[in-house]
Amino acid sequence: DQQVKQNSPSLSVQEGRISILNCDYTNSMFDYFLWYKKYPAEGPTFLISISSIKDKNEDGRFTVFLNKSAKHLSLHIVPSQPGDSAVYFCAASVGNNRLAFGKGNQVVVIP
Amino acid sequence: GAGVSQSPSNKVTEKGKDVELRCDPISGHTALYWYRQSLGQGLEFLIYFQGNSAPDKSGLPSDRFSAERTGGSVSTLTIQRTQQEDSAVYLCASSFGKLREKLFFGSGTQLSVL
C-alpha cells in the first residue's frame, strides 16, 4: 500500500513563477519528511526536510510546509528556474532511517 | 570516489538467469540501503545494513532476492532466477547512519529482464 502519495504526476511552470508540489501521507506515525530531487540517469539528491514538530522549513528558494492534521505537505519553489526541471520525490520516515517514497512529480520549468 | 558508485549501470538479462548488482558506498558511511524503482512507481525499500547489526531485510520482495555487505563496505544485491517483473532501476544509498540523516544515492543499475 502506498503510504506516501503524490498526485498530479507532472507540472509545467514558467521560469520565475512558483512551483507547488503536493504530497499526502496515510501513516500518522511519520515524524520526519523529506524531498528529494532526481535528474535523468542520476540518483536522487536530498533537497529539504522537515520534522513533525515544525510546520514550515525554508532553505533559499525552497520551502516545505507541513499540515499534520491533514497529513499533507507541500514544496514551494520560488522563483522557479530551468535547472529545477527534474522529478521530485516526497519521502517520510517513522523514527528511523527507512524512508517511504512517493511516486514522484515531474517538474518542467519553461524558460 | 566521492560518491556512491554502482555497477553495472545497465544490465540486460534473460528470464531465469541470476544477476549481481554492486554498490560501493561513500567511504566512512556505515549505513547502506537498497531501493528499487519500477516504471511509474516510487522508490521501494529493499534492505538496510547498519554497521555490524543484522540487516533489515523486510523489504525484499521474495526469497529470490538477497544482499550481502562485505567488510562493512561494498554490497552486492543478488537476484536469482530473474523474472520480468524484476525489471527496474536498483538504487543504492549510504549515510553515516545517524537518525534522520540524508541519504546519498548512487546513479542506479537499470535492470531489464527479457
Image: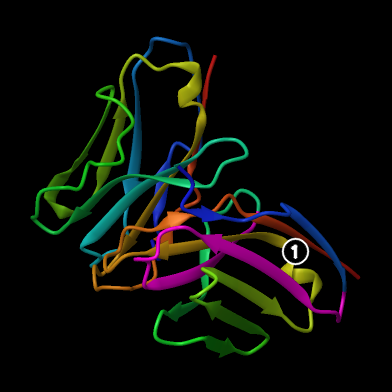
Question: Percent x, y for residue B41?
Answer: 57, 41
Badge 1: residue crowd in 10 Å (few <14, some 14–19, many ≥20)? some
Say which element carries label 1. Answer: loop
Residue B110 located left or right of residue A94: right
Q: Which residue is mark 1?
A: A85
Residue B73 in sight: no
Q: Is residue B18 visible?
A: yes
Which residue is pictured at 40% across the width and 17% down the height?
A: B82
Question: Which coloring applies here?
Answer: rainbow
Quadrant in which residue A99 is drawn:
bottom left
Q: Which corner quadrant holds the C terminus of chain B?
A: top right
Residue A42 is a magenta residue: no
Tell me the magenta residue range.
A15-39
What is the quadrant of residue B59 in the picture?
Answer: top left
Residue A108 at x, y = what percent?
80, 61
Q: Residue at x 63, y 90 (%)?
A: A60
Label 1 resides on the chain identified as: A
Q: Name the residue type under label 1.
A: Ser
Q: Residue at x 48, y 77 (%)?
A: A49
Residue occupying the point 25% across, 50% down: B48
- Left or right, A84 with respect to A30, comes to right
Report x, y in % for residue B39: 60, 35
B52 is higher (above) or lower (below) than B79? below
Circle count:
1
User: Where does the image place residue A79, in percent across and percent down from the top left?
Assistant: 79, 83
Q: Is residue A17 magenta?
A: yes
